[in-house]
Image (spheres, coloured by chain):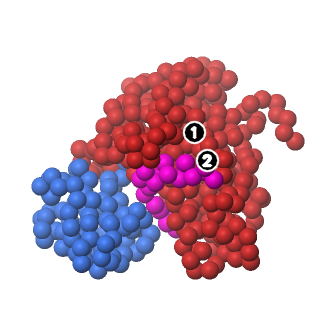
Chain colours: A blue, B red
Amino acid sequence: MAIEVKIPTILRTYTNGEKAVEGKGDTLAALIDDLDANHPGLKGRLITDDGSLHRFVNVYVNDEDVRFTGSLDTALKDGDAVTVLPAVAGG
Amino acid sequence: MTRYESLIDALGNTPLVGLPHLSPRWDGDKPVRLWAKLEDRNPTGSIKDRAALAMIRAAEADGRLTPGCTILEPTSGNTGISLAMAAKLAGYGLVCVMPENTSVERRQLLEMFGARIISSPAAGGSNQAVATAKELAAQYPDWVMLYQYGNPANAQAHYEGTGPEILRDLPEITHFVAGLGTTGTLMGTGRYLRENVPNIQIIAAEPRYGELVYGLRNIDEGFVPELYDDSVLTSRFSVTSYDALRRTRDLIEHEGIFAGISSGAILHAALSIADRVAARDERADVVFVVADGGWKYLSTGAYSGSLQEAAEKLEGQLWA
């Protein structure tokens, strides 16, 4: 099961500069564990010590913010697109 | 009554118009209808007039803002234009800190209203504008920073204005969709609707920009507006420039509405939700915000050439 994960510039030091990497997992938590196995250190930048998403990191599955779809328990399926972005100001 | 004592008094009470062509099902016993709240019909042509005037009034009421004062604000454009008009009429000075990658029309409007613009670097987008404004506020303590990202009057303007207007015009509303920037529109309108409409869904659409805008040095430099409370929302969508442009053009093509690019992003999120409801064979009345008209974005090339070309031209621009 392959899921494409888009990585923001600021985290590409963990992916050898790759803009997008592939991972697998049937939940977001499983996907992040899988990513961390291939790109050590990435998980620590996305998830805090208490196990929740970092306040300044937004993760979207098919353009929808996972904080409103179950957070790390959000279910994933083959072909889903995951995008990681830092939280920035708008307005 | 549509007679007003001054331009500022003509704020709000904007029209709510149906989208019979773009709605998944306009007629029948289970309609899924889209309604546009035309906020471009405000005094300076955007929804930001509501927040700007409310923040000025609140600062006047608590004595922070007195005649001759200079207002300071980080803004990507519309809030600045609203503040500039109101400041000109009331005799305040205005200094706007604006990212350099914003459209030329916004700069021209600000200058026309007499505002002084301090540009912040394109890299880092509005984050950098906020940081620069905070530095200036420390440097010039007599300037009054209204700070739209954390000023409760911003959300309150929508709690008292936008929300009640929508409910008055469409008591059967099931979903409200708006853009997420300062979060003021969604927090204020969302709270009002949640208090008055059982099971209302509050949906946020945020712009997804090119990489330059996310160019932080460190994740800890990220920014979440102080006004933001995610318990007000039920879902949140990130919308690419391409999808925003596509929907902006759909609005013109099918409904005759000439809207700004962020309104296309908001419509995109509204349609995602509306299509899900239609697929479940349920009914819905979805209100979405048209935050401003398209005039200020003509120079970006958003309205001419192919969608792909237009999206490429927008890369690196702040369009919401």
Q: Quadrant of the N terminus of chain B?
A: top right
Q: Residue at x 46, y 35 (%)?
A: B300
From the viewer's perspective, is residue B203 above or below residue B227?
A: below
Residue at mark 2: chain: B
- Along the horizontal axis of the image, is A91 left or right of B39? left
Confirm whether circles 2 and 1 share one chain: yes
* Earlier sequence position, callout 2 versus callout 1: 2
Viewer-side residue, B137 vs B193: B193
* Residue A80, quarter of the rendered image: bottom left
Residue range (magenta): B233-254
Q: Which mark is residue B294?
A: 1
Q: Is residue B266 visible?
A: no
Residue identifier under label 2: B252
Q: Residue at x 31, y 72 (%)?
A: A79
Q: Are marks 2 and 1 in contact (CB under 8 Å)?
A: yes
Q: Residue at x 26, y 71 (%)?
A: A3
Secondary element at tag 2: helix
